[in-house]
Amino acid sequence: MPHLKELHASKKDQGLVLIGIHSTKGGEAMEAYVKDKEIDYPVAIDSDGATMKSYGGNSYPDYFLIDRKGILRFADLANSQLDAAVDLLLAEEAPEEAKADEAAPARDEAPAEEAPASPPGE
């Protein structure tokens, strides 16, 4: 887990989204571990193993990488393969709609409680 925390910290600004999936019993223990180790990415509990099984996972830890387009590109990666695979996917160009979202100017809107009830001039 320490390596994942470091990987997430160093690559999240490049677009890495990390989601941990804990696939053994003991969600309360995992929750305490996440808090104690200050893990800042989400960790889901898969106590019945359905998620792990759906991805074809068969070891712990196991890594599955989904690219910027939402396509599963790497499955059942070993620890030694993780960094290179992440770097490969992060080097790929973002899909056009993601670029458009990033390029769109931020909207300067008042929070709902401060927004006028009707458009100006009415």
Image (spheres, rainbow, N blue to C red):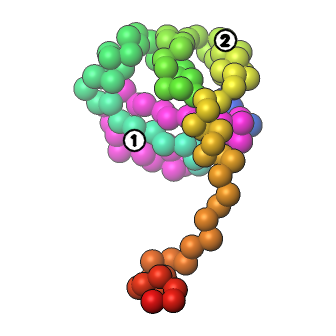
Q: Are marks 1 and 2 in contact (CB under 8 Å)?
A: no
Q: Secondary structure at mark 1?
A: helix
Place residue 30 in its image quadrant. Answer: top left
Front residue (pair 34, 101): 101
Residue closer to the observer: 100 or 23: 100
Q: Is residue 119 one of those drawn in magenta?
A: no
Farthest-out residue, bottom: 122
Above or below 90: residue 84: above
Report, in whole angstroms, how far the alpha carbon at label 1 lies from the one at label 2: 27 Å
Amino acid marked by disc 2: Ser
Residue lying at 53% horizontally and 14% vertically, measured from the top left: 73
Q: Is residue 47 visible?
A: yes
Eyeballing the image, is 94 above or below 112?
A: above
Quadrant placement of the C terminus: bottom left
- Which type of secondary structure does the marked residue at label 2 adopt? helix
34 on left or right of 38? left
- Residue 113 — which label? none
- Nearest to the observer: residue 99 or residue 5: 99
- Give the magenta-colored segment's residue range: 11-37
Q: Nearer the viewer, residue 34 or 73?
A: 73
Residue 16 falls within the magenta-colored stretch: yes
User: For mark 2, does the 10 Å Cα neighbourhood hold few (<14), some (14 to 19), or many (20 or more) residues?
Assistant: few
Query: Residue 41: percent from the left, percent from the top?
Result: 54, 43
The amino acid type, in three-letter code, at marker 1 is Ala
Residue position marked by numbered label 2 in the rendering: 80
Q: Earlier in the sequence, mark 1 or mark 2?
A: 1
Number of callouts: 2
Q: Residue at x 32, y 17 (%)?
A: 54
* Residue topped by disc 1: 29
